[in-house]
């Protein structure tokens, strides 16, 4: 329909131009009518033309185009009157024509002519008087207007349909003319006032129809530069453009709209139609969905395990969280977009994965945990445990796959297996060694009695030294065995403390007194310091003795002759602070973080003359922590070492204090000292 209207408009414009030319020609000819013949007139224009006798209305002559149009021959025309082709003309019409001719007027009429076939045609007739050989005639230029009239009738019928459609459509419609102004501001200089607005268009914005006709697009729109570019581009290129914008209501209400613009010609002018759909609800839903998606993406991003979303049909990736990208060694999720899940699955697992996908597609629920092997971007392989669940996604379904890297777990299991195997081995060996060692020690003690009873024997001193060496090495072995057994019990949770309320100051002081002579014989000075009269703590005195003796043993081993060892007890807030400080060789600072690790020795060259298993300090830390305390070390190479031990203070009433047993304590400490100091050679 639109194309027909355009064609009709073009034809009408052409007719207007031809009519104007004809009027000029007729005016010009009017001065030379006496020298023009009928044939010259009729053959000059390729149009429907008739020459009529004014007096009686008879047709004098007709052009070839008239003969073709009406279907009569030239001879038939000459025997006809104008009434024969115009049945609706009256005598008054003929008289009016005569009057116009008398006044030398050019007149345009719209008539209905009958063809020879009987068919009626709508015609436009332009008439003017002419003289031929000094005789007055009526010259008629006829245009067939049947199609145009039909178009106009159809247009009128369509206009009513258009009006009904225009007013009842749910979207807002705004129609305006476009004025040519190159380089001008589009909204201000080019887009004119609205010429029509439908009911939805003005009620949505809170205006009346009349108010809208005094407004233009600039009054209701807040176009961004890119939106303005789209609108202007659609008009310049006669294209349909679609974009989102915001319309402003009468009260300043902002209404998000989806805009569709189309440029066309209306009544010979360039016009544009804006179709605006209210998308307020859609925007709200989009905002909710965006917020939900952002929350989901953040949740997925913070998950420690890899999360992959895969289209269940194409197997192409839709999403990958940070953990997945790190696992597969990709930088962005977009890098995976062009790949399928099979691109990261090891070929050995392809069939299994495909079967699991088919099962997941056919069923609902969570897929069971399975082991799979992935291939990283660089070709490296990694073992993973995966599970999946089917979810709706976009217009189809997707699988959310959660993959856990098994590398650390496998290494941990391997390490734990080796560690457990090693611990069990040491435990079994230690238990097997303890019995024969106790038999040996018992036999050596009996042997010492025999030696002491035979002092007159010339080999007495030789036997005594040999026995001491044997006993000392038995103590060394017993110390290692005890440490191994104790550390195994601690690991397995079967090690218990015999906790008592004890004066820790007195306990430490008794230990120092017990080892004083031994340390002096090593060429060292041992000093005890304390600003406390007593410090009551809950502890296992035997285990505390063992801890202190171990620290003193290390101080003696790694302090050269003439060195000093200070053991200090003081209070620090709610803790008893025990400090064992020496002036020995010290510990390299880079080794301090590992000094309490099991089976760690600071420097084998340093321990060559002082044997050790690397268990002692690890056991010390474990015993201190079992008491609720902490231990740390301050040291540096050739700067000496300072071990700081903190035990929590437990306040009790005076009458509830535990009265320590002094009986056999000295003997017990000496025996413990012999065991703990057994790996120290004489300096």
Image (spheres, grey):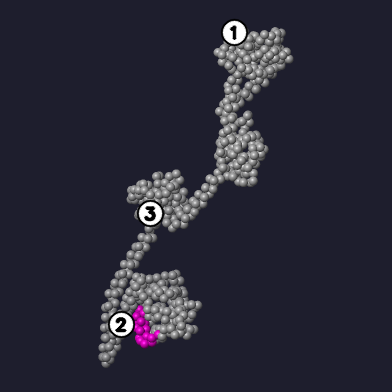
Which circle, 3 or 1, is nearer the viewer? 1
Q: In the rendered structure, are the residues bearing label 2 and label 3 in contact, judged by CB atoms less than 8 Å apart?
A: no
Pointer 2 residue: 471
Q: Position of residue 404 (x, y in %)?
A: 39, 56
In three-dimensional space, the C-alpha distance between marks 2 and 3, rounded to whole angstroms, equals 60 Å
Snapshot quadrant of residue 491: bottom left
Q: Position of residue 620 (x, y in %)?
A: 40, 75
Q: Is residue 353 above or below residue 625?
A: above
| Mark 2: few/some/many CA within 10 Å (<14, 14-19, 20+) | many
Determine the residue positioned at 37% across, 60% down: 409
Q: Along the line of sight, which residue is nearer the eye, 428 or 163?
A: 163
Which circle, 2 or 3, is nearer the viewer? 3
Q: Which mark is residue 388?
A: none
| Mark 3: few/some/many CA within 10 Å (<14, 14-19, 20+) | many
Labels 2 and 1: the sequence-earlier one:
1
Pointer 1 residue: 76
Can the viewer see residue 274 in this picture?
no
Q: Along the line of sight, which residue is nearer the eye, 148 or 317?
A: 148
In three-dimensional space, the C-alpha distance between marks 2 and 1, rounded to whole angstroms, equals 158 Å
Q: Is residue 122 above or below residue 345?
A: above
Pointer 3 residue: 386
Range drawn in magenta: 660-681
Q: Along the line of sight, which residue is nearer the eye, 54 or 606?
A: 54
- Could you say whether the residue bearing mark 2 is in a helix, strand or loop? helix
């Amino acid at each position: 329909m639109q194309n027909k209207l355009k064609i009709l408009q073009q034809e009408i414009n052409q007719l207007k131009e031809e009519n104007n030319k004809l009027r000029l020609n007729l005016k010009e000819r009017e001065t030379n009518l006496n020298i023009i013949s009928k044939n010259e007139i009729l053959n000059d224009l390729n149009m429907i033309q008739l020459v009529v006798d004014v007096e009686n209305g008879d047709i004098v002559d007709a052009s070839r185009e008239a003969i073709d149009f009406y279907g009569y021959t030239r001879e038939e025309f000459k025997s006809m009157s104008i009434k024969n082709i115009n049945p609706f003309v009256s005598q008054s019409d003929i008289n009016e024509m005569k009057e116009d001719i008398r006044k030398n007027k050019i007149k345009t009429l719209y008539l209905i002519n009958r063809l020879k076939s009987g068919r009626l045609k709508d015609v436009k007739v332009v008439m003017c008087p002419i003289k031929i050989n000094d005789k007055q005639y009526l010259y008629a230029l006829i245009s067939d207007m049947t199609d145009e009239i039909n178009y106009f009738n159809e247009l009128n019928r369509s206009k009513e349909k258009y009006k009904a459609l225009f007013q009842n459509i749910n979207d807002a419609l705004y129609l305006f003319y476009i004025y040519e102004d190159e380089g001008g501001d589009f909204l201000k200089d080019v887009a004119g006032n609205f010429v029509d607005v439908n009911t939805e268009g003005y009620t949505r914005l809170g205006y009346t129809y009349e108010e809208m006709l005094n407004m233009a697009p600039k009054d209701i729109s807040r176009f961004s530069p890119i939106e303005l570019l789209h609108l202007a581009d659609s008009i310049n290129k006669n294209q349909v453009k679609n974009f989102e914008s915001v319309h402003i209501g009468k009260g300043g209400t902002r209404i998000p709209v989806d805009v569709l613009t189309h440029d066309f010609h209306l009544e010979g002018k360039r016009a544009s139609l804006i179709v605006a759909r209210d998308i307020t609800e859609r925007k709200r839903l989009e905002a909710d969905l965006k917020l939900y998606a952002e929350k989901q993406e953040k949740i997925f991003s913070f998950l420690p395990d890899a999360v992959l979303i895969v289209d269940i049909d194409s197997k192409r990736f839709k999403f990958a969280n940070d953990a997945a990208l790190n696992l597969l060694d990709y930088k962005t999720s977009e890098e995976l977009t062009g790949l399928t899940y099979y691109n990261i699955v090891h070929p050995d697992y392809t069939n299994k994965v495909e079967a699991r996908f088919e099962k997941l597609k056919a069923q609902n629920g969570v897929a069971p945990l399975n082991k799979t092997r992935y291939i990283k971007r660089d070709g490296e392989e990694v073992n993973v445990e995966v599970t999946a669940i089917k979810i709706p996604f976009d217009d189809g379904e997707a699988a959310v796959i959660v993959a856990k890297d098994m590398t650390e777990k496998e290494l941990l299991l391997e390490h734990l297996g080796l560690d457990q195997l090693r611990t069990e081995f040491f435990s079994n060996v230690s238990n097997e060694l303890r019995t024969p060692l106790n038999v040996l020690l018992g036999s050596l003690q009996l042997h010492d009695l025999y030696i002491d009873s035979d002092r007159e024997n010339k080999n007495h001193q030789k036997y005594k030294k040999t026995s001491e060496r044997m006993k000392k090495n038995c103590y060394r072995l017993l110390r290692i065995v005890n440490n191994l057994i104790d550390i195994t019990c601690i690991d397995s949770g079967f090690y218990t403390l015999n906790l008592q309320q004890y004066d820790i100051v007195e306990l430490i002081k008794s230990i120092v007194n017990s080892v004083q002579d031994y340390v002096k014989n090593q060429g060292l000075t041992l000093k005890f310091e304390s600003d406390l009269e007593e410090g009551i703590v809950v502890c296992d005195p035997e285990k505390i003795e063992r801890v202190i003796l171990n620290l003193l043993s290390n101080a003696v081993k790694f302090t050269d002759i003439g060195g000093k060892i200070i053991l200090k007890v003081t209070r620090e807030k709610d803790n008893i602070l025990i400090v064992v400080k020496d002036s020995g060789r010290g510990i390299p600072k880079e080794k301090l973080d590992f000094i309490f690790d099991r089976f760690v020795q600071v420097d084998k060259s340093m321990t060559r003359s002082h044997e050790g298993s690397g268990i002692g300090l690890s056991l010390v830390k474990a015993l201190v922590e079992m008491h609720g305390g902490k231990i740390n070390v301050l040291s540096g190479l050739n700067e000496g070492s300072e071990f700081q031990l903190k035990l929590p203070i437990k306040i009790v009433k005076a009458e509830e204090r535990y009265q320590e047993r002094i009986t056999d304590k000295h003997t017990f400490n000496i025996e413990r000292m012999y065991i703990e100091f057994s790996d120290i050679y004489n300096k």
